[in-house]
Image: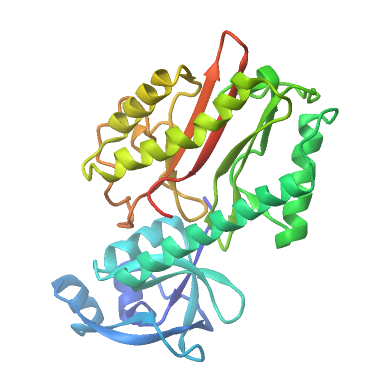
Amino acid sequence: MADHLLFSYGTLRLPQVQKARFGRDLTGRPDALPGFRLGAVTITDPAVVSDSGSDEHPVAVFSDDPGDAVEGAVFTLSPAELAIADAYEVDDYLRVKTELRSGTTAWVYIDAATAEQLRAKRLLDAQDKAAALFDEIVKQDIIVAGQGERAISDRIRDLANEMYGTTRHWHKRIVRSGPHTLFPYRENPPDRTVEDDDIVFADFGPIFQDFEADLGRTFVLGDDPVKHRLAADLPVIFHAGRRFFADRPDITGAQLHAEIDRLAREAGWTLGGEHAGHLVGEFPHEQIDAADIESYIAPGNGTPMCGKDRAGRTCHWILEIHLVDTARGFGGFHEQLLDLG
């Protein structure tokens, strides 16, 4: 796995802490964290106090003065060393990615409450940008009959680049039409030309400020009333699922999936995928693992969704609604943040 950049303004810069925790001296370069100021936190972990020589450590918090900045240094750590740093920093801190004064993006440990506010804001900002992209897709009439799915996907990619600069995507770009809308995410059907009476969905995962957006929307080109009904049901079932989630603080992934399945069947559809959503966060979100059912809204996930991830951060979720009508040979897709917005 690739190395990580970590910005430190506190005791991880001390030679005795570096030797005690990493077994070596770290070589850093000066940088600063803009928009923050220093506070203080009292450390009660005896091992951390012993290594640092103090029970009072600095902690970065948001500043009301945009001119404020916290000075420090950027170090390069291996994945194993980053895990060691996580273990050293107590629960008052949380690791987030942010842009430094130099323009470098690096991990930094900041006040835990501040960090969660920052993570939520950036996830919502990323989603807002993705939603604006989809609005522009409609305005420019990009999804039209006679165009291939790949060509439409490429046009949307180019539009995103025009709107936001060169964008990365954390998962494959998806545009599916007609019978291809039956396929779940993992499938890779051949290219298909969109037809006059098609239903089409797009699923894009652009990355903004190292935070992942994941937005899916459905478009109906013709006048087929059943296709229009399915497209209209997608956001209705999404919001019903969101309310079900919000009313149950101990809900598990399996329970939410069962409710989404019930809502789909009640409306006369079936679910088209193996799961109904997943964790989302910083890129790359190390908690998403194809073999780890706890990362998904899926049968078999008996873990409460409203918890912390392995790094101690609040879990945030994407809810996916993939409805299909197998008899008529089409489906639709709708996804966005479940617990924010």
Q: Is residue 247 above or below residue 6?
A: above
Picture coordinates of residue 182, whole percent (x, y): 59, 19
Residue at 37% of width from left, 49% of height from top?
A: 339
Residue at 79% of width from left, 48% of height from top?
A: 140
Q: Could you tell me if residue 186 is visible in this image?
A: no
Colouring scheme, one of rainbow, by chain, secondary structure, one colour: rainbow
- On the rendered structure, is 161 left or right of 225? right
- On the rendered structure, is 314 left or right of 290? left
Relative depth, front residue between 44 and 17: 44
Q: Quadrant of residue 103?
A: bottom right
Picture coordinates of residue 175, whole percent (x, y): 69, 33
Residue at 67% of width from left, 17% of height from top?
A: 179
Q: Is residue 299 above or below residue 250?
A: above
Residue at 59% of width from left, 73% of height from top?
A: 104
Picture coordinates of residue 145, whole percent (x, y): 82, 29
Q: Is residue 128 above or below residue 228?
A: below
Q: Going by the picture, which residue comes out furthest to the right?
A: 146
Q: Is residue 82 above or below residue 235?
A: below
Q: Quadrant of residue 209?
A: bottom right
Q: Could you tell me if residue 173 is visible in this image?
A: yes
- On the rendered structure, is 305 left or right of 178? left
Relative depth, front residue between 88 and 322: 322
Report how many numbered discs are placed on residues in the image.
Answer: 0
Picture coordinates of residue 185, whole percent (x, y): 57, 28
Relative depth, front residue between 226 and 137: 226
Location of the C terminus (image quadrant): bottom left
